[in-house]
Each structure stands twice: as C-alpha cells, then as structure tokens.
Image: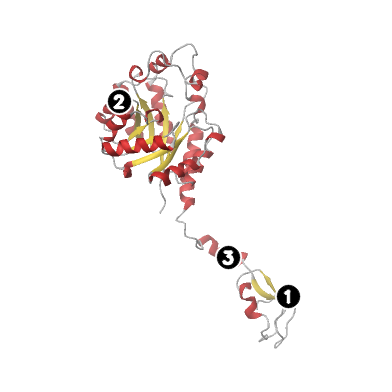
Amino acid sequence: MTQRTLIIAEAGVNHNGDIKLAKKLIDVAAEAGADLVKFQTFSAYRLVTQSAVKADYQARTTERCESQLTMLRRLELTDGMHRELIEHCALRNIGFFSTPFDIESVDLLLSLGQNLFKIPSGEITNLPYLRHIGRLGQPVIFSTGMAIMGDIEAAIDALEQAGTARSKMTVLHCTTEYPTPMEEVNLRAMQSIHRAFGVAVGYSDHTQGIEVAIAAVALGATVIEKHFTLDRNLPGPDHKASLEPQELKAMVLAIRNIEVALGDGIKRLTSSEAQNKPVARKSLVASQAIKEGELFSAQNVTAKRPGTGISPMRWDEIIGEAARKDYNEDDLI
C-alpha cells in the first residue's frame, strides 16, 4: 500500500505582511497539489527582545540597520488576517496550517480550530512552551534544526510527560541555514532519529532545489516541509531560499511519483515485464544442424532469444541428451 507523504508548502513570512500576497501564496500551494499551506503565528514583542540581532541570512536579505524586532513586526499576521486566510484555504480546498512561536499563539490557533501543531526548531528547548502544547494531546510535528540527539530526546520526553503520546509525534530532520549547503544536509540523520526514538520522521528542507526533499521521501520521510514564494526577488528574509511556483509544483509531482515507485517491497514479475519477458529472455537453440539421435553438446547448442523455449538454466539437464528429431540452425530445442 502506497504511503502518502504529507506535503507542507511553507509560505512562512513570505507574505511580507500583505494579506493579498498571502492569499496568492495559498493559490499557488493549492495549484501545486500540496496538502497544507503553512504560515507563522507570532507577536514580535513576545518573540524577541529589542536588542536581538538578525541571523546572517536575514541581514543579507533585509535592511541591515534595522533590528530583528522591527523586521518581525512587519511580518505579523493579525487575528483577522488568520481568519481570512483560513476562509481562503477552504475556498481553495487546501488545509490551513500555522506555526505558533509562543504560548498565546498556540491558544489563538487552537481557538481557530487548528488540531495539528508545528513546533519550530527554535522552540524545541522552550520547556514551558513544549508543556503547553503537550497538554493539548494533539498531533505534533517538530523540527530539529540546531539540535543534537539529546535535545530531541528531551523535547519528546517533555511532550510525553505533558500528555502527548509518542505515536502522535513526527520529528523533522532539519538544518537551520537558508539556504542549507549540501554538505550540511546529512539526510541519513533522519533515519537515525527514527531508529533512536521510534517516531515517525520527515524533513524540513531549506536547500536550494527540490532533489533533497525527493530523496528524503525515498529514505522514509512521512512529512516534507518546503518554503515557497511567488518570486525569489521579493524583499524579505526567506524569499531567496524558497521555491518559486513551478518548482513547488514539480516537487509535489516528483514526490507523488516516488510514493508510487517505492511500492510494497515484494519482488515480483510485473504485468509490463510479463509482456517483455519472452522477447528479452533466451532459450536453448540449435547453433547448427542436429540430426535425430545426435547428442546435444556445447558445440551444437547455444542460448538465443526469444525466451519461449527451454530456459538456458536447464543447460546441464539438456547437454548429453540425444536429439529426438532433426533440428535446423536456430530451431528451439
């Protein structure tokens, strides 16, 4: 049975605080065939101090002189904007999803009907926040950028002790750099997380291109999260490391193809192969004229196509036997 990957199109803050742009992002995610389109729910004042500096990638893509607080204030979504986006998602038949960055944002999303919660990489060491989400007992996805195995274990324990079963958790391998260099992806770490903690795993992809996300599905990812934008040249911290619409569509299609291609693991003759087997396989044939009573030998028998006669795997059984009739060259034995 084919396992369907949950594909999360990460709009994040690529709406630049513009509700019209946010709705266009929903349209793109829906047209690409993603399962969920994800935004970010936060209050800049609750998230960072006034003196908090930007990450290098943020400084490279936004005004260097402004603080992280100033940048984030422009990217907040109001309660009313959340409701508009949820309505637009319903119109486009795609699930609305958002990552809460503080406890009050968790409660807002809960009040809006969200019943799946995403914990971002920066919050997996925030114990009060983890306990608050854990007490909800809802399915949880959490990213593990900047984490070591001990951090992941502690986050899982905190969620479990608060009331969320491990069976409801999906842990995403992730590298917190935008874009992520290929040499820092370490995709096999996703499998290590699965083996160590017995949880479902996935991949939150910050690389350029779509190949790593596709490879993650082949390695067992049940969830793929990928940033996208309308245009990489738009101003803002995440646009440069995001997919454009056609790339998102190509990624979704490739993942759906990989899901089918993975199959059930049983090696069997397919219906297509059954038609090709007689053409591609070989049979034992006379390599020269053979008279009735003459012994079959390596000198007068060979293997050639088509595969409609005796299999060459029966060579030892045939060699040394007497021919029961005359054969011309190339006749099937």
Q: Residue furthest top?
A: 65
In the foreground, 151 or 88: 151
The residue carrying mark 1 is 287
Which amino acid, by three-letter code, is at mark 3? Lys
Q: Could you say where residue 220 lies in the image, as x and y percent from the top left? A: 45, 46
- Quarter placement of the N terminus: bottom left
Label 2, secondary structure: give it.
Answer: helix
Question: Left of 200 or right of it: where is 236?
Answer: right
Q: Could you say where residue 35 lies in the image, as x and y percent from the top left? A: 39, 38
In the foreground, 137 or 268: 137
Can you say whether 216 is above or below 47 in the image?
A: below
The residue carrying mark 3 is 277
Label 1, secondary structure: give it.
Answer: loop
Which mark identifies residue 296?
A: none
Residue 53 in view here: yes
Residue at image point 46% right, 41% down: 190
The residue carrying mark 2 is 105
